[in-house]
Image (tube, rainbow, N blue to C red):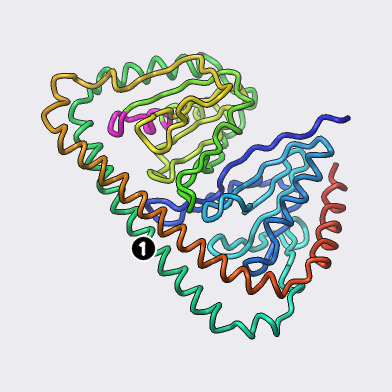
Amino acid sequence: MDKKGQIRRMFPGGNTTAGFVSWFQYMIRPDANRIFILKGGPGTGKSTFMMAIGQDLMDRGMDVEYHHCSTDPDSLDGLVIPALKVALMDGTAPHINDPKNPGAVDEIISLGEYWEEKEIIRHRDEIVSTNQKVSRLFQIAFSLLRQSRAAYEEWESYVQETVNRAEACRILRSLRERVLGAGTAPNQSAPKSRHLFGSAITPKGVVDFRETLLRESSRIFFIKGQPGTGVRQMIAGIARSAEELGFFTEQYHCPYEPEENKLDMLLIPDIQTAVVNNSPPCPFGLGNPVGIRPVAEIDLDDCMQKGRQEEYEPERADAEIRSRDLLQKAVDHLARAKSAHDEIEGFYIQSMDYDRVRQKRDEVLHKILQYQ
């Protein structure tokens, strides 16, 4: 039996402390052969459409990328087949994707063609009112995330006062040299980077897919440290150095601190190397992933000046508790929004002609296989 393909899992968008952040423009490379944009309401089968095609391609031995939805991590926002330079992606709100090169590269698949419109109109009032409820619950969730971030930044401030910055800079220089050495990229064209999320704040809590992304790295460096020690800034600093050398990088942001100058994980495929935030105190640390053995583990807590940690410890501990509690409240509201959204899906599911959807899926699969 032929070897099956492998799945890499990630999130192209995230529920973050800055609202919904999208990196959909990095899902597929600019020189894509074909991009299928799926349009249609909730429950029309977009995610199932992509998963079925992904499974068929894996059965044929192709590697695929599953781009999961942060609002429903069991569903897909996109599917990428890197070897064929082909992608399928959800083109509905909040990640509106419209064709940039219609016909030449981009093709819209409208699953709305396969529903019974009269059945949907019959439930118009319930759909509209429930959509308003979903929107309100998301507003509350994002407000709670902002409050959680404020408490987190207070937590950081107490730690920052104790950090020996000279020692942290020394560790960064040493780590950068170990990661990048004196090497240069095999391709000396302009540096390129890809930005995504490896973890997400979801209705199920924090969901982390980074283990699926680390399988291809033979050298893995773990960095850990309390908030305020600069773990994410250190990883971003190494990413900038890699770009300056001409390496292609995959940069995975944190939904809690989604800024470009802070990273949770850096992959450098050319040298099969990864640098990963592995901070157990934070909800986004990998902990001890099974089967992943780092070549080095750096603990930035070693840069903290021991004598200064106790002075504001009660305040720091209180800020940590508030940050975590508010994060959990945000997750609870995302779960309520997901439950309400499921009600809307039910109205569409009962009106769909899924036999015609499957026929369309087989047609799209046939087109994709032509790029082999």
Instruction: Work out which quarter of the rendered image holds the N terminus and state it.
Output: top right
Tag 1 secondary structure: helix
Q: Is residue 286 left or right of residue 69?
A: left
In front here: 173 or 87?
87
The reply to whether the magenta stretch includes residue 2 is no
Residue 299, position in %: x, y? 35, 20
Residue 97, position in %: x, y? 61, 61
In front here: 160 or 238?
160
In front here: 11 or 125?
125
Please give the name of the residue rendered at 69% of the width and 48% of the height, measured from the top-left corner: 79
Please give the name of the residue rendered at 78% of the width and 42% of the height, measured from the top-left corner: 84
Q: Is residue 277 left or right of residue 64?
A: left
In front here: 248 or 216?
216
Residue 61, position in %: x, y? 81, 35
Specify start and end residues of the magenta stretch as a single range.
Answer: 226-236
Residue 29 visible here: no
In the image, is residue 184 above or below residue 103?
A: above
